[in-house]
Amino acid sequence: MESRHERLWMRLKEGNLLRRLVEEHFDGVLLIECATGEIWELGDTFSAKLRVENRSMDGVLYDRQLRETMAHYVEAADREMLVQRLCLETVKKMLERQDAYTVDVDTWRAEDKAFCKRFMFHYLDDSRTVIAMTCEDVTANLLGETDPLTGMMNSVGFHRRVQAWIDKHPGQRFRIQRYDVDRFRNVNGLYGRDVGDRLLRDLARHMKRFDQGENCFSAHLHADHFARFCAEGTMTVQECYDNFNSCFADYDLSIAITLHIGVYDLCETDCDASTMSYKALLALQSIKGSQTKCIAYYEKGMMDEEREQGELLRDLESAVANGEFEVWFQPQVDYASRELVGAEALVRWRHPVRGLLMPGAFVPLLERSDNVYQMDRYVIRKTCAYIRRWQDDMPGRHITVSVNLSREDLDRPDLCSRLDALLTENGIPRETLHLEVTESAYVEDTRRVIEAVRDFRSRGFIVEMDDFGSGYSSLNALKDIDIDKLKLDMRFLAGDDTAKGRIILRCIIGMARELALPIIAEGVETKEQADMLLDYGCREMQGYYFSRPVPAEVYERLLRGEERIAALCE
Ligand code: C2E
Ligand code: MG
Ligand code: MG
């Protein structure tokens, strides 16, 4: 005789949901009859895997079986809470509000192994007489999708959930945000990893508080990078920024910690979640280190630019080996005595396909990818070889050359001793090779720059502060670091030849004089500027008015006196 359940089974068999449930590889499917609370097992999956006693579960009351199973598999502390969440009354209540009800049980223990099971409930039929409960083992999923440090989703979990949302809400708008903790590297460096980890965990906890289910959630991707998905209508970018930034208010650290946010909000239909997230990252990178801009939006074209930069970066790997970098020299003059007094070494890249590239096209790229040190070492080695040759060819000729150091170079503990060895090897006096450290490096990592400059000077190198006046804390930098010379960047006055600009210029030159700091003005483009600078007491200058950077052979002719700088002959 047909059992009641078999009749029910026949009736439900045509339903799509049931077919799908059976076809998908769940640990098991249980049917719960709403009126009686009795269960009926679909196939023998449950009794095979979960059966507590050696008997079929058919016809048993769901709530009774639930308690029995929980008692067997779940630790006492979690048991009652789970029974509450999974009992028939709760399930029914939840299904009144939503189509499906899901509970993850991650304290499931069997043979001392931790499991995570996902229980999901649906009504099987429109008349709501039967509930289907599926159980799925998601241990591997969750272990692979959770970041152990913060307990947040990792990038795999984040991108999967974003993709699921997009698939479920076609055409709806959303935003993906990528977060970077500004100067986090310094927190780790100065205060230790423990403080760094605590900061990341605090930020994670803070962000999670603002999560709103599937429409708004955050993740910890790696290091100090976080991500957040917001469906339209949830928090605005500015709200996110204000809320999450405030998390650092209680941190008593000497460096100010802030967030930078890159936002992707174009919602392109042909783009997958991880590409969109990458686009948000490109927006973020466009403001890395910026003091004035904390939020940037992805713009079309950033991706092409990135692709091009990726190609350049790949080419850079072989550029040193292939000798593609050239060192050019920009003359520095004493405008009062009309003499050539030195030069700045500036790198150029003779790219086999793209031709001669200026540093702006590749130095920032190298800096971002931590590869600038290799190039700078090459430039310095080459510069030393030129100096050696000129000293040999023109004995008695006074030669000085300044080379540029990137902030990243200062992190290399061996830089100082390598430079020392290089100069000794080439028989070049310390004061011949000047080192330029840019003012913006000081802003980025004050302590490191102070230490590095002290090291260089203690070994007899002459250190110049490059681009003085172009950054935000020129005066602080000047107060804190003992340097040998200021390079005043004339471009900070660009387009502004008013009385105000002149007053500032005069005061800076006067200040340098009072501090007994030699000063050189760079970016001098006109005779008027040169005359004005001289008038205020700045004699040394560098700029297009005198000469653009030139290849080594041309500079050599200037050194020999075979060629002259036109502006000095007037
Ligand atoms: P910087 O050290 O401030 O170098 C001066 C830059 O200003 C040079 O640009 C130079 O060509 C340009 N310049 C000189 N006179 C004038 C002028 O009168 N008007 C204007 N508008 N510009 C002038 P360049 O060669 O393109 O180098 C740009 C930057 O790239 C340099 O700025 C420096 O920060 C960096 N750089 C150059 N070579 C190296 C290198 O070997 N290593 C590192 N780490 N950075 C380098
Ligand atoms: Mg320079
Ligand atoms: Mg400069």
Image: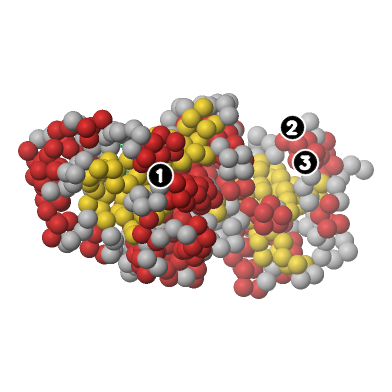
Disc 1 marks which amino acid? Ala
Tell me the kind of residue under disc 2.
Asn
Judging by the rendered image, the residue that carries numbered circle 1 is 345
Distance in Å between CA atoms under marks 1 and 3? 67 Å
**Residue 419 visible in this rendered orientation of the protein:** no
> Which is in the foreground here, disc 1 or disc 2?
1
Q: Which of 332 and 100 is in front in this view?
A: 332
Badge nearest the viewer, 3 or 2 = 3
Q: Which comes before the other along the chain, label 1 or label 3?
A: 3
- Foreground of the two, 184 or 540: 540
Residue 24, labelled with which disc?
A: 3
Task: Classify mark 3 as within 8 Å of ligand 1 or not, answering yes or no.
Answer: no
The alpha-carbon separation of the residues under discs 1 and 2 comes to: 74 Å
Q: In this view, does 342 lie above or below 232?
A: below
**Rendered image: mark on residue 497:** none
Give left or right: position of 60 versus 143.
Answer: right
Element type where label 3 sits in the image:
loop
Circle nearer the viewer, 1 or 3: 1
Q: Do the residues labelled 1 and 2 touch (CB within 8 Å)?
A: no
Residue found at x 34% / y 33%: 563
Identify the mark nearer the N-term, 3 or 2: 2
**Along the viewing direction, whichever of 495 and 148 lies nearer the viewer:** 495
* Disc ID at residue 16: 2
User: In percent of the image, x 50 and y 36: which residue is there?
Assistant: 349
Q: From where the camera sits, is residue 142 visible?
A: yes
Disc 1 crowd rating (10 Å Cα; few below 14, some 14-19, many 20+) is many
